[in-house]
């Protein structure tokens, strides 16, 4: 199959998608890729009538994702791969509910070995009764800018481009997606607490605590922040069960901590069939998730879908 990729966006997320696409080209032989074409913001999509399997990659500001998906479907793209969050308002969510074109969301942590392994353990009832899903996603960008007295010209300071939140929409959506993936259901109750300490703009929350309650007593608790001093990109998620405890941290992506009683063991990845195909402990960081999403989307396999992304944002918007 000949694939014609188009990219909307020019920031770090666009660079990540570009690099991931290149890895897919280099590590797979089942597809032929035409050169990537970049689409400037606020310009019409190209005529796709004679284009081989056009794929749209969306990495522009958050509040523009929904419009790009809708226009991408109208233009005739066969597949859309979009950065999270998929929408920043209930109006956008409603507008997206009639989209029929396959849309893959870049909730990259879900597509990495650690979370996939945790999900398999849940499906196999390895934990017995699930008690709690807990974890954190910590960064330090807001703390560092406040320490230095900086205020950037970031598009995230413009509510028309970012939506009415920062941490909650940007990285909180990652953590909620992961928790929902493990729980396999929508929560029946959600509580959020937000802090704006060290915020660059009034709408930009910097620290969020998320509590979700599911059926059968299962709960999920997440601490999500851009103002934890010293943090790098610390995504961690743990499953506490009747029979076992297991925890995965993005900073050690190919190791899973598994405990029973007072015994602790470490499960290491051995297979090479995910992401870039690099040996364990020699991967490409979060690009691994991007690579896996692109591959699965092109194969029609398992990936975070538009429906998944809409559910995440409905939960966050209902409780923001």
Image: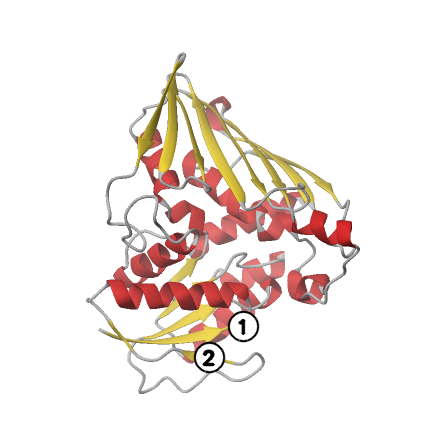
Q: Residues within 10 Å of mark 2 (few under 14, many from 20)?
A: some
Task: Give the vertical position of 284 relative to 115 (above or below).
Answer: below
Q: Nearer the viewer, residue 112 or 151?
A: 151
Q: Nearer the viewer, residue 48 or 208?
A: 208
- Residue at point 40%, 42% (across, down): 253
Task: Give the vertical position of 212 relative to 110 (above or below).
Answer: above
144 on left or right of 173: right
Residue located beneath label 1 in the image: 10
Q: Nearer the viewer, residue 242 or 196?
A: 196
How far across and down, in percent of the image, does residue 9 sit?
53, 72
Residue located beneath label 2 in the image: 38
310 on left or right of 200: left
Look at the numbered disc 1 and give the secondary structure of its residue. loop
Sequence-first disc among 1 and 2: 1
Q: Are marks 1 and 2 in contact (CB under 8 Å)?
A: yes
- Residue at point 48%, 27% (across, down): 215
14 on left or right of 295: right
Task: Give the vertical position of 70 relative to 201 (above or below).
Answer: below
Asked which colour scheme the image uses, the reply is secondary structure
């Amino acid at each position: 199959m000949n694939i014609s990729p188009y990219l909307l966006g020019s920031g770090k997320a666009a660079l990540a998608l570009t690099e991931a696409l290149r890895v897919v080209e280099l590590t797979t032989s089942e597809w032929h890729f035409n050169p990537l074409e970049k689409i400037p913001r606020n310009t019409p999509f190209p005529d796709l009538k004679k284009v081989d399997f056009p794929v749209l990659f969306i990495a522009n500001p958050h509040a523009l994702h929904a419009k790009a998906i809708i226009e991408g479907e109208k233009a005739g793209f066969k597949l859309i791969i979009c950065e999270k969050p998929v929408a920043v308002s209930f109006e956008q969510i409603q507008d997206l509910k009639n989209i029929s074109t396959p849309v893959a969301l870049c909730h990259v942590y879900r597509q990495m070995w650690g979370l996939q392994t945790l999900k398999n353990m849940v499906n196999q009832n390895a934990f017995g009764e699930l008690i709690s899903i807990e974890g954190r996603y910590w960064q330090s960008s807001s703390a560092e800018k406040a320490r230095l007295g900086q205020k950037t010209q970031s598009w995230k300071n413009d509510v028309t481009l970012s939506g009415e939140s920062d941490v909650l929409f940007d990285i909180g959506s990652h953590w909620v997606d992961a928790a929902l993936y493990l729980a396999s259901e929508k929560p029946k109750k959600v509580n959020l607490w937000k802090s704006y300490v060290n915020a660059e703009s009034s709408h930009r929350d910097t620290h969020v605590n998320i509590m979700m309650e599911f059926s059968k007593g299962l709960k999920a608790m997440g601490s999500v922040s851009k103002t934890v001093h010293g943090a790098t990109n610390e995504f961690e998620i743990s499953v506490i069960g009747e029979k076992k405890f297991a925890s995965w941290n993005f900073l050690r992506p190919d190791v899973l901590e598994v405990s029973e009683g007072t015994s602790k063991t470490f499960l290491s990845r051995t297979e090479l069939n995910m992401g870039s195909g690099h040996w364990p402990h020699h991967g490409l960081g979060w690009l691994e998730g991007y690579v896996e999403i692109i591959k699965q989307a092109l194969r029609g396999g398992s990936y975070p879908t538009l429906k998944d992304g809409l559910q995440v944002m409905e939960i966050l918007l209902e409780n923001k």
